Structure formats: C-alpha cells, structure tokens
Amino acid sequence: MREAQRDAIQARREAAARRRERQRAHASARRETAQAGRDARVERARMAREVSLVDLVDRLLDGGVVIHGDITLAVADVDLLYVGLRALVSSVEAMEREMGFSPTARGSALEGSPR
Amino acid sequence: MFCLYAITDWKPRLDTPGHGEAPLQAIRASGIAAVASEHEDLSLVADEDALWAHERVVEALMDQGAVLPIRFGTLLESEDEVRLLLANRAAEFRRALDRIRGAVEVGVRVALRGDEDARAMPDASASGPGTAYLLGQLERTQHRGSVAAHVVDALTPLAREHVSRAGASTGSSLRSAYLVERDRLDDFVSRASELEDELTGVRVACTGPWPAYSFANAEAPR
C-alpha cells in the first residue's frame, strides 16, 4: 500500500516535471518567435528609415520654398552627405540594384541653386 | 539670426523645438506667418540630425493645418528681414498655401528589379556586342517608359497633382511626388501596392506623408 502511494507520488512528480519542461520549451519557442519578429521589424524599420532619409534629403535640400540668397549650406557639405547616403543605401542589399541614385547629378543640380 | 522652417496663414501652436532645441516663434506680416527660431550664431550642417530637426518642426505644423515648408538652411539676419520677405511675397505664399491645403505629399519610388533588366538584354551572339548593348539599352528605356506611364495613369486619378523628381531618368528607378488629399491617402497607398501585382518585376515604394516640399513653389511648379 505504502509502496503504491510512493509510486503515485513519484508519477505525479514526474508528470509535473514533464509539464514544467514542456512549458519551458514553449516559452523558449515563443521567445524565439518574438525575437525573430522583432528582428524582421527592426530590419524593415531600418530599411524604411534609410529610404526615407534619401527622400528627406531630396525634399529638404531641393524642395521647399526658396528664399533667394540666404541658403548658407556649402555645396561641399551637400556632396559629402550624398556620398554618405549612397554608401548607406548600398548597404541595404534589397535596394542595391534597384535604386537609381546619382549624387553627381544631384550635386550639379544643387550648384545651380542659390545659396 | 533667424532660421526659417515654414509659412502658414493661421496661428500655429509652437511646441516642437527648432535647431539646437531653440524655441520657435511665429513672425507675422500681411496675414501670414513665418515659423522661425532665433540664434546668436548658428552654423548648420546638413547632417541627418539637423535634417530631421527641420522635418519635425514642419511635420508638427502640418498636423495643424496647411503649411508651406521652407528649404532647409534658410537663414535671415533680422525679424525685419523676415517681415519684409512675407510682405513682398504674401500673394505668392497665399496661392501656394491654397494649392496644397488639405493635401500631403507622397513620395513614390518605382524600381525595376535587376533580373528583369537582365532579361531585357538581347542575345549578344545575334549581332555585334555594341549593337546588342544599344538594343538592350533601348529596350530597357522603352520598358521603363511603359512602366512609368502605367504608374502615372494608375495614380494620377487619386492625386491632385504629380511631379517627376529631378534625376528620375538616371539609373533604373523612377522617382516622383504626388500631392494627395488627406482623406484619399489610404486609397492612394493601396493602389500603389496593387501596382506591384500588375507589373511584374517592378517594385513600388511609397514614403510619407511628407509636407508638400515638391509643391511649395507656386511660381515654378516642379
């Protein structure tokens, strides 16, 4: 009788241990999935931001109301920025071949603007 | 010295700081206002942080009403100079504000996938390599042209105006900007994403909504 009780307790302990193990495995899988989701989101956000940055530069330096004679930016700064951006954009593999981005064309366009 | 961000024809709420965390002020003349920040000495470099600082100011204003963004890095010496600018160009600025009122700018970037370009390359053995290269170029140009036309036809009915941006003809991507009514923004973006299914090997990316930088100059539409 006592032996049967011991066996039952032992069985319950083992079942509890298995349950805990399963929970640990589930939690770990959930964490991995969540992490993968986060990574993908971060990657997408990073890419969106880099593409946005190119569009931001296009707009802020080449668009907007022009007040003649008072743009104080040096063209050298602008060229450097574009070169930097091109490197940035090139690093995004998916965008690398797809984007026609020409810092020289933009640079010469900017030389013609008032500053 | 005053750094200028935007022009409005209503009373703006100014809770976003300008460059170097400087507070914003609205300088008024002729019924319009220039949003500016005052600086003892400001040397602006067009780096990422400075560009976003300018953009944040304009976006915060955009949420309140029609706003005419001023090009980054515009500095005027005194408040009087700012008032003089507003007075001299008031009519032009009002027209420009009317043009963009109720709308936002969406950047549309259409890229042909690299493999699609490679397929368009004819067999080099058929003729000389120079001819093949030129034929390939021609085909790519024609392909680009028809893709561009399809995109413009699909998107212009959903927009007030559109412009092709400078440099659009270089490289393999087409860059354009559309002026879209705020309440048609969702329709516009979903139409743009449908285009990827209609045109094989083409990638369509929208950015924004931006302040109407590409539609800000009433006298010279770009």
Image (spheres, helix red, strand yellow):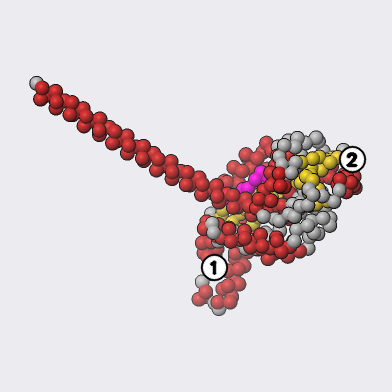
Kind of residue sitting beneath label 1: Met
Name the quadrant of the C terminus of chain B.
Answer: bottom right
Point out the residue furthest to the front here: B40
Kind of residue sitting beneath label 2: Ser
Q: Which mark is residue B121?
A: 1
In depth, the one of A17 and B113 nearer the eye is A17
Q: Is residue B127 above or below residue B8?
A: below
* Residue A35 in which image quadrant: top left
Q: Residue at x 65, y 40 (%)?
A: B185
Q: Examine the rendering and report whether any part of residue A19 can be seen.
A: yes
Residue B148: x percent and y percent?
A: 64, 55
Residue B150: x percent and y percent?
A: 63, 52
Q: Main secondary structure of the magenta part?
A: strand
- Please indicate whether residue A29 sits to the left or right of residue B31 in the image: left
Q: Is residue B26 above or below residue B201?
A: above
Q: Residue at x 59, y 75 (%)?
A: B131
* Residue B65 in which image quadrant: top right
Identify the residue position indicated by label 2 in the image.
Answer: B30
Q: Residue at x 79, y 49 (%)?
A: B40
Circle 2: element type: loop
Q: Disc 1 or disc 2, which is closer to the eye?
A: 2
Q: CA distance from mark 1 to mark 2?
A: 59 Å
Q: Which mark is residue B140?
A: none
Residue B8: x percent and y percent?
A: 80, 40
Same-chain status of marks 1 and 2: yes
What range is drawn magenta here? B204-211
